[in-house]
Image (spheres, coloured by chain):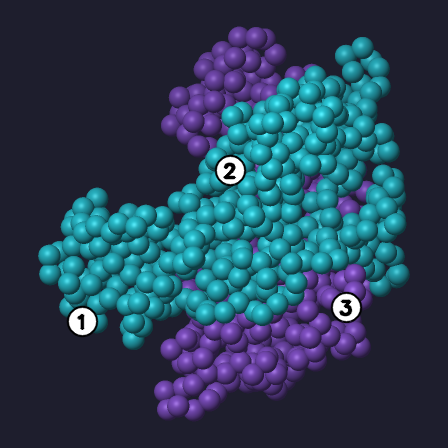
Chain colours: A purple, B cyan
């Protein structure tokens, strides 16, 4: 993509009311537009990053048997009354609206009810189990305050998978597989080493749930990390009893601020009972389906990557989720030099490299470098009249200090 | 995908309140789940079709310079007051809700305001123009009645592109290109020959807008088609004056029911004025940006394809948007035959063919064929003990009557 043809531009300042580092950087670098507190539009760069994250999550979900679908945003009151979650005194972050005839409807804040209701129609026998449907969708939560940028939005893009198993054993098998898939996801997006599987409070059907907590000062949670095993415990269950149960030594745990970038939860029959989601087992007996939920907020994950990996000059994208792989910065002004730079851009395009080409004229070199650091593409390639004299370019990785000169033919290899 | 592992199943009946043919067929075949009138969830088959349509539209939009982004669903009242479209007496199909502090917000029913507001921040000079941002997003319209299945939803998935040009000449250039891209889209999804570019009412800045109307009895519009040129006129502008202006002979026009599957509209400065979206031209003068809008409802397009191409046995998907290319139907029960069928499935998978494999045991052949016709995959391949005797399979296209026997090696070529 040629920067001269892109409508977004970097900005010196984020909006005054934007206090989070992730949204400040993403707005200044042209990834996001702020619509209101907790609500953002994704500009072309931002959408490119989201789509990369989405594709990584999709691959990992498919690899453990996930089947993608897409549930509606508008929600039928009757369905939520079954699980007793319609009432605003029970769930306090609903957005609700109504049809012309006065019927109240809600905006999806989670998916357990929609999935239980849909699957009820198709699951009858143990032969129909297990199944692992999931979707990517916009989710709406009426947060009282929303000051963490895209780490806690009122509107956010989400992956939710639900597992439907015939019993706890079949459930546990998938639950363990999901841990591996989640670990892979956080590794692949570049924050694996800072993301800890964390014991958190469970429910009626499990002693614990598991959160994936990424260490960052911007986090809203406190966790206690055993740095040797990588295991962690959320403050909410940090008691002597729990530590001894998990075989953790209090002396060796380190307190950290962290953000929950994913979570997996054993639901058991909490939702299959009210929806009478049941099946006939091998012995002809009727049993309730055993469920689990597996969520990841994509915006939150993107925000966490920015919080964790940025430096004082701007964002530092890992290659796997960067909007482009190469930032080709041309300092050429003479027609013959510009032509050579254009040719390099076209050669890289032909090799299917994802290249952002700073072909802007009338912009100072210093400004181009500052923009490039702010946007954070992994590899910067500078073409200038000086480098062209020796048929070469200057290359520098965003996360390294040293630049080096390589020949154009080496670049194109 | 193995049908034995899929949670959806075909159904004998659609819900009693579902009166539209498109939703009846799509629900019975397991593409959709009805949440309420005008609101549907997309099951795995349905999402596969939507993603194919989405990718075709994306390619065509990118080919004319479109840049993808994603605007928010939740909308700020202040922005809509600028264009005077917040008031319910002016726009009567808003869904509105509110934040905890009582601030009213709306759910996106269109995108002109969001785009004008965002672009205002980035467009300053004639050098910043033209630009063609677009997005795919869920759109919400509070329709009083909603009985046309996915052809008129209260929640629907939409592509909207907006053009921002420096003047009418630059606008017209893109407007003509968009006609070609739209024609390509309807050709590629398989309803090109039945889709007519149709003159419809314009606005302050253009005599006409252009609709792409697909002929179907399920359509909500009346158009008059000149079958020789393919050109058509919407009833709303069907006057002697307009016909003479367009050089059309009333005697040669045929009245048809049709559904609007796309539309393009010259907005002029209707939105750039209230948003003060302006730029400095070559002479240093300040001018308002000249805009156009280009919409396609993906659900409506999918519903139209079903309405137009289905027969009395079920859906008939064109190859380009079918959920799978091949429906491999196995009638094998003996272990050695089942193994051969599995091998054929795996070979086709390895060739990256999109195959739905009906490997279900205990389902009658007649039922498998009826399911296959209902689901509507373009090519059906039957493997039975009988065909395996001669190392062959029976192949039949969904839109043809004749089946033929070919060797397995020919199939795999």
Query: Image height check: is B393 above or below B70?
Result: below
Alpha-carbon neighbours of circle 1 within 10 Å: few (<14), some, or many (≥20)?
few
Q: Chain of mark 1?
A: B
Q: Chain of mark 3?
A: A
Q: For this view, does A170 lie left or right of residue A359?
A: left
User: Which residue is at 63% across, 27% downward?
Assistant: B250
Percent of width and height locating residue A91: 75, 74
User: Which residue is at 84% across, 44% downward?
Assistant: B85
Say which label, 2 or 1, has the lower sequence index: 2
Q: For this view, does A56 lie left or right of residue B126?
A: left
Query: Image height check: is A117 above or below B211?
Result: below
Q: Secondary structure at mark 2?
A: helix
Q: Quadrant of residue A124?
A: bottom left
Which residue is disc 1 drawn over? B335
The circle drawn on residue B194 is 2
Q: Disc 3 and disc 2: Cα gap in Å?
A: 38 Å
Residue nearest the observer in this picture, A10 or A98: A98
């Amino acid at each position: 993509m040629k920067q001269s043809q892109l409508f977004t531009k970097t900005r010196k300042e984020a909006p005054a009311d934007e206090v989070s580092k992730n949204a400040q950087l993403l707005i200044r670098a042209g990834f996001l537009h702020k619509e209101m507190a907790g609500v953002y539009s994704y500009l072309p760069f931002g959408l490119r990053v989201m789509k990369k994250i989405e594709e990584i999550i999709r691959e990992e979900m498919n690899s453990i048997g996930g089947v993608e679908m897409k549930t509606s945003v508008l929600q039928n009151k009757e369905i939520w009354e079954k699980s007793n979650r319609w009432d605003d005194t029970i769930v306090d972050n609903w957005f609700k609206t109504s049809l012309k005839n006065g019927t109240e409807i809600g905006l999806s804040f989670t998916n357990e009810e929609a999935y239980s209701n849909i699957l009820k129609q198709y699951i009858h026998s143990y032969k129909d189990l297990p199944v692992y449907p999931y979707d990517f969708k916009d989710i709406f939560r009426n947060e009282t305050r929303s000051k963490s940028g895209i780490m806690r939005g009122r509107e956010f893009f989400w992956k939710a998978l639900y597992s439907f198993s015939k019993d706890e054993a079949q459930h546990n098998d998938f639950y363990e597989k999901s841990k591996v898939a989640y670990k892979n996801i956080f590794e692949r997006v570049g924050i694996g080493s800072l993301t800890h599987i964390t014991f958190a409070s469970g429910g009626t059907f499990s002693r614990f749930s598991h959160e994936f907590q990424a260490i960052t000062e911007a986090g809203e949670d406190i966790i206690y990390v055993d740095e040797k095993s990588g295991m962690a415990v959320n403050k909410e269950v940090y008691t002597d009893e729990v530590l001894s149960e998990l075989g953790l030594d209090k002396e060796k745990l380190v307190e950290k601020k962290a953000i929950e970038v994913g979570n997996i939860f054993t639901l058991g029959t909490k939702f299959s009972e009210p929806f009478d989601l049941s099946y006939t087992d091998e012995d002809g007996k009727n049993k309730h389906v055993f469920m689990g939920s597996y969520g990841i907020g994509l915006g939150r994950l993107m925000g966490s990557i920015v919080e964790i990996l940025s430096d004082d000059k701007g964002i530092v994208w890992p290659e796997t989720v960067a909007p482009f792989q190469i930032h080709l910065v041309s300092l050429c002004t003479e027609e013959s030099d510009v032509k050579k730079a254009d040719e390099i851009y076209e050669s890289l395009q032909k090799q299917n490299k994802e290249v952002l080409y700073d072909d802007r004229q009338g912009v100072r070199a210093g400004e181009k470098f500052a923009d490039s650091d702010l946007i954070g593409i992994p590899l910067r390639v500078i073409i200038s009249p000086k480098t062209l004299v020796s048929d070469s370019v200057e290359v520098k990785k965003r996360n390294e200090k040293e630049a080096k000169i390589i020949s154009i033919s080496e670049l194109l290899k």
